[in-house]
């Protein structure tokens, strides 16, 4: 059977009734554009979430914190393992040190945050100071702009050195060179303001440092300044990581010796070299900590990869709702195509009867009508892709959200459009192919 003739007849009929074809195409085009923009929004939002996590340590980061509340310590052994200590850092570092992938091993950092007032010879400010270890620089994707970061020798000998964030460096020294100069630190009293609201949100849930009011002022040598940390979801939005530029960093051992006393740290962070090594590293951490804490799990291990999976699972409901809205638009376009084809069939009953009387088969009539539907849907899908590409910039600016518009998204939009045209064109095509030629010829 020659299929060229029914396809050609379908194209000629579309050309003969241009207004009808344009209406059908517009219905599909608008639906296709809405689907493309919707998918681009969803994919862009997920990529932004991953980018933000990557800028603050990546999805392979594991965090250990002291368990908060809900635990009664009855036995003496429980009292002896309260909180997290610097020895826990050493135990975890040893436990995960051998788990590597492609010559890249896990990075481990201890941390504790302090609220302090910091002053140079000219200026002073109230900031959050983080006591960390050298791996913290790479784990948080930080870069040194001047000088150096903390070294293992600084931690080993509890040196009184400090590394400044870019903004606090500008506040204290302006345009002057900060390297080699000293800053003075004093601990704020409890209840005294020192953190911005954004910093408080970022540090929420972490242990509150023990106040050391009454201590004499301490001097620290500035050995490094970090480059500005910037993350913007759009050019119109502010820097989401500006709070990181307002931090200062000292060795964890120095903080314990000069600032807080004791052995307690705020938490641990471990960066696995890959997603495949997250689980064995997490198990190694847990084994080391349980052994050190005499079987008491008075800590919690937070897995960013699991948390991201939970976010994406919860986000699927919103994805379904938003994607459903775009799909409804395309569904409406499909209904428009079907209705117009059914209406055109009423006008073309005699034409179908004549073709059948001249020997046209049911399949040829079916293909002719289905060809019109698929071609209209294809043109609408291509037009929707062009319209969606144009609208994506406007929508992105209005919502201040990134859109991920690539060949995959456009291919999905065009493919779904043609599928809709195929599905909604089947019923009119079947009706046309089943017309009785005698009845069709007598139709007025």
Image (cartoon, helix red, strand yellow):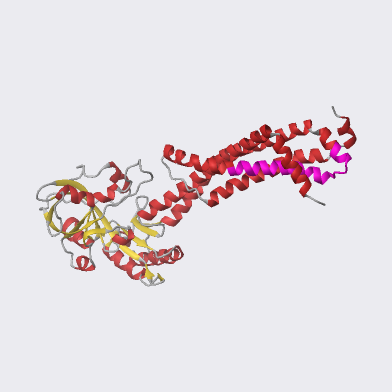
Determine if the magenta segment contains residue 379: yes
Quarter of the image for the C terminus: give it.
Answer: top right
Residue 217 can be seen in this image: yes
Residue 166 location (% of width, % of height): 23, 52
Nearest the viewer among 74 and 368 is 368
427 shown above or below 284: above
Task: Write the start and end of the magenta stretch as one range.
Answer: 354-382
Residue 154 location (% of width, % of height): 20, 65
Looking at this view, name the residue that lies furthest to the top. 444
Residue at coordinates 41% horizontally, 57% vertically from top-left?
59
| 90 on left or right of 250 | right
Majority SS type along the magenta span: helix
Residue 94 location (% of width, % of height): 33, 70
Nearest the viewer among 16 and 359 is 16
Residue 186 can be seen in this image: no
Residue 292 location (% of width, % of height): 33, 66
Residue at coordinates 17% horizontally, 56% vertically from top-left?
259
């Amino acid at each position: 059977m020659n299929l060229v003739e029914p396809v050609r007849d379908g194209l000629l009929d579309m050309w003969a009734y241009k207004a009808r074809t344009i209406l059908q195409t517009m219905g599909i085009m608008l639906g296709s554009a809405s689907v493309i923009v919707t998918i681009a929004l969803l994919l862009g939002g997920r990529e932004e979430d991953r980018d933000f996590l990557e800028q603050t340590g990546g999805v392979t980061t594991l965090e250990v914190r002291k368990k908060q509340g809900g635990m009664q310590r009855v036995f003496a052994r429980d009292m002896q393992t309260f909180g997290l200590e610097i020895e826990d850092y050493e135990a975890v570092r040893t436990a995960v040190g051998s788990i590597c992938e492609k010559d890249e091993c896990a990075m481990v950092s201890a941390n504790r945050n302090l609220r302090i007032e910091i002053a140079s010879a000219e200026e002073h400010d109230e900031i959050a100071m983080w006591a960390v270890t050298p791996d913290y620089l790479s784990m948080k994707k930080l870069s040194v702009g001047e000088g150096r970061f903390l070294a293992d020798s600084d931690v080993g000998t509890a040196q009184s050195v400090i590394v400044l964030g870019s903004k606090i460096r500008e506040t204290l020294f302006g345009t002057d060179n900060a390297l080699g100069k000293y800053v003075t630190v004093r601990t704020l009293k409890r209840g005294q303001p020192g953190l911005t609201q954004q910093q408080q949100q970022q540090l929420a849930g972490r242990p509150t440092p023990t106040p050391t009011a009454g201590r004499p002022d301490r001097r620290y040598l500035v050995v490094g300044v970090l480059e500005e940390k910037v993350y913007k979801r759009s050019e119109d939005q502010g820097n989401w990581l500006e709070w990181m530029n307002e931090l200062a960093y000292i060795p964890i051992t120095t903080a314990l010796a000069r600032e807080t006393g004791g052995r307690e740290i705020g938490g641990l962070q471990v960066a696995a070299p890959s997603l495949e090594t997250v689980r064995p590293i997490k198990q190694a951490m847990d084994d080391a900590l349980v052994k050190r804490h005499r079987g008491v799990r008075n800590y919690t291990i937070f897995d960013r990869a699991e948390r991201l999976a939970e976010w994406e699972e919860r986000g699927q409901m919103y994805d379904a709702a938003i994607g459903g809205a775009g799909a409804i638009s395309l569904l409406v376009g499909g209904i428009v195509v079907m209705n117009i084809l059914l209406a055109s069939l009423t006008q073309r009953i005699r034409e179908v009867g004549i073709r059948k009387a001249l020997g046209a088969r049911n399949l040829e009539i079916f293909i002719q009508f289905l060809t019109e539907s698929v071609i209209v849907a294809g043109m609408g899908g291509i037009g929707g892709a062009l319209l969606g590409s144009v609208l994506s910039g406007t929508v992105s600016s209005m919502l201040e959200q990134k859109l991920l518009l690539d060949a995959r998204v456009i291919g999905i939009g065009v493919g779904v459009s043609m599928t809709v045209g195929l599905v909604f064109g089947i019923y009119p095509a079947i009706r046309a192919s089943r017309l009785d030629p005698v009845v069709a010829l007598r139709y007025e």
